[in-house]
Amino acid sequence: MLRLYQIFTLFVGLFVALLPALATAQSTASLTGIITYREQVLLPADALVVLQIAEVTSTGSGGRVIVEQTFATGGAQPPFRFNLTYNPALIDAGRVYTLQGRIQSGGRTLFTTANLIPVITGNAPRSDINVVMLAVRGATLPAAGSELWLVGIALGLGATALVLHGVRRFRRTKMA
């Protein structure tokens, strides 16, 4: 009988210990969508995308951050799909929440959301959110396709070398 009591106590103890983890795993929701920007520029390979859900203050600006997620682009270029998970227990249905973000590289902010994007409460979306970021003034990036001039130079040098090789060969055959 004592052995059965010990086993029962062990199971109850394990259940109580795992309860917070189970509650956290079951109480998540997410925002999904796509991040883009209008400028025709390339992001550096080390670019990071930072997304936040923040509570809107009475002044209409972003306030307390509910969750923040950062991901590396790994050299990829937009559009970027995102799935930002948050704890719905932190959301007050009577408040307004916004999605805000930025793209950074080397400690500098290159792009940011210029407008507040309402999410979660009221009729605000939770999926298929289109986040359009704007370039930060003073941030310089290479124009998309700007690396093609290097290809042009390489092809030009290759063609020049081929012509010079042909001229030298022609001279050698003429002299012999």
Image (cartoon, helix red, strand yellow):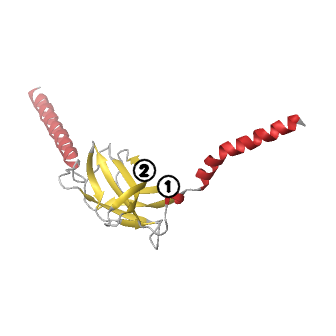
2 or 1: tag closer to the N-terminus: 2
Is residue 79 visible in the rendered image? The answer is no
Q: Residues within 10 Å of mark 2 (few under 14, many from 20)?
A: some
**Which of 129 and 45 lies nearest the eye of the viewer?**
129
**Which of 75 and 5 lies nearest the eye of the viewer?**
5
Query: Where's residue 8, x and y in %?
Result: 81, 41
Name the residue at 39% across, 67% down: 118
Q: Amino acid at mark 2?
A: Gln
| Relative side of 48 to 138, left or right | right
Displayed quadrant of residue 78: bottom left
Query: Where's residue 73, x and y in %?
Result: 37, 47
Q: CA distance from mark 2 to mark 1?
A: 9 Å
| Relative side of 10 to 34, left or right | right
Is residue 11 visible in the rendered image? The answer is yes
Q: Residues within 10 Å of mark 1 (few under 14, many from 20)?
A: some
Residue carrying label 2:
69
Query: Do the CB atoms of the residues marked 2 and 1 lie less than 8 Å apart?
Result: yes
Query: Where's residue 137, x and y in %?
Result: 19, 56
Q: Which mark is residue 85?
A: 1
| Relative side of 5 to 120, left or right | right
